[in-house]
Image (cartoon, rainbow, N blue to C red):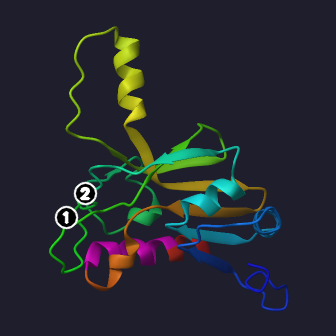
């Protein structure tokens, strides 16, 4: 992280992919970089993202069904050229369930957090109980797969979508390109 954020490199965009561990110092450096106008893209780095944004990301769920993701904001530029029902079944040409996400993030609602895409266990049967209990149960099975976090002059995108399939799935590829382009604006 230190080398990545080296001031001499003057990077407009920092991409963090697959990072599981992040020290307190690295989290602080990333927040400083972003608050000064830096742009960060977290790809399947839920642990690092939570360390950097503990006030916004409170945890995650590893879904039993991660094959279908829905857009929360279909007007967001990260979805340009992507149909509302196309965030599903990302293909990697392997004989396995074609997942679209690896985890769903639990995040707080805040003016600095923009919910962009989510995943929910679709085969959940909610029987009985008061409406409040059913809503709480449904919410416990839902999480975000793409969110934007604003911090002073900078912003980040945190994604648990299977963008590593960009070489074999055109929608995953388009989504990855759109995320990079959005952060370079």
Q: In which quadrant of the rendered view does residue 101 lie? A: bottom left
178 lies left or right of 52: left
Instruction: Determine contact: label 2, label 1, CB under 8 Å.
Output: yes
Q: Residue 157: where, in percent of width, then height?
A: 56, 63
Q: Nearer the viewer, residue 105 or 9?
A: 105
Work out whether 26 lies above or below 4. Answer: above
The residue drawn where x is 42% and y is 23% is 136
The part of the chain drawn in magenta is 169-179
Lower position in the chain sequence, tag 2 or tag 1: 2
Q: Nearer the viewer, mark 2 or mark 1?
A: 1
How crowded is the residue under tag 1: few (<14 C-alpha within 10 Å), some, or many (20+)? few
Work out whether 104 lies above or below 179. Answer: above
Q: Indicate the quadrant containing the N terminus: top left, top right, bottom left or bottom right.
A: bottom right
Q: Residue 65: where, in percent of width, then height?
A: 26, 50
List the residue tagged with mark 2: 67
Q: In which quadrant of the rendered view does residue 78 lie? A: bottom left
Work out whether 131 lies above or below 27. Answer: above
The residue drawn where x is 42% and y is 55% is 103
The residue drawn where x is 81% and y is 85% is 6
Task: Give the structural element (helix, strand or loop) at label 1.
Answer: loop
The overriding secondary structure of the stretch rendered in magenta is helix
Q: Is residue 152 magenta?
A: no
Q: Nearer the viewer, residue 152 or 48?
A: 48
Q: In which quadrant of the rendered view does residue 95 lie? A: bottom left
Q: Residue 54: where, in percent of width, then height?
A: 69, 48
The residue drawn where x is 25% and y is 69% is 90
From this viewpoint, which residue is outermost toward the top?
130
How far apart are labels 2 and 1 at the CA level? Answer: 7 Å
Residue 185 can be seen in this image:
no
Q: Residue 151: where, in percent of width, then height?
A: 74, 56
List the residue tagged with mark 1: 97
């Amino acid at each position: 992280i230190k080398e990545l954020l080296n001031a001499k490199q003057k990077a407009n965009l920092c991409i963090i992919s697959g990072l599981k561990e992040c020290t307190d110092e690295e989290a602080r450096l990333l927040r400083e970089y972003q608050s000064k106008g830096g742009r960060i893209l977290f790809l399947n780095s839920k642990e690092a993202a939570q360390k950097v944004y503990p006030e916004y990301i409170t945890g995650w769920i590893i879904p039993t069904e991660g094959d279908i993701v829905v857009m929360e904001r279909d007007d967001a530029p990260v979805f340009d050229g992507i149909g509302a029902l196309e965030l599903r079944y990302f293909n990697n040409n392997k004989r396995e369930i074609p997942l679209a996400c690896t985890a769903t993030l639990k995040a707080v609602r805040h003016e600095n957090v923009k919910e962009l895409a989510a995943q929910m266990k679709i085969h959940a049967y909610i029987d009985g109980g008061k409406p409040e209990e059913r809503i709480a149960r449904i919410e416990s099975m839902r999480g975000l797969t793409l969110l934007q976090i604003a911090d002073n002059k900078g912003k980040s995108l945190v994604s648990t979508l299977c963008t590593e399939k960009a070489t074999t799935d055109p929608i995953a590829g388009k989504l990855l390109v759109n995320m990079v382009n959005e952060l370079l604006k």
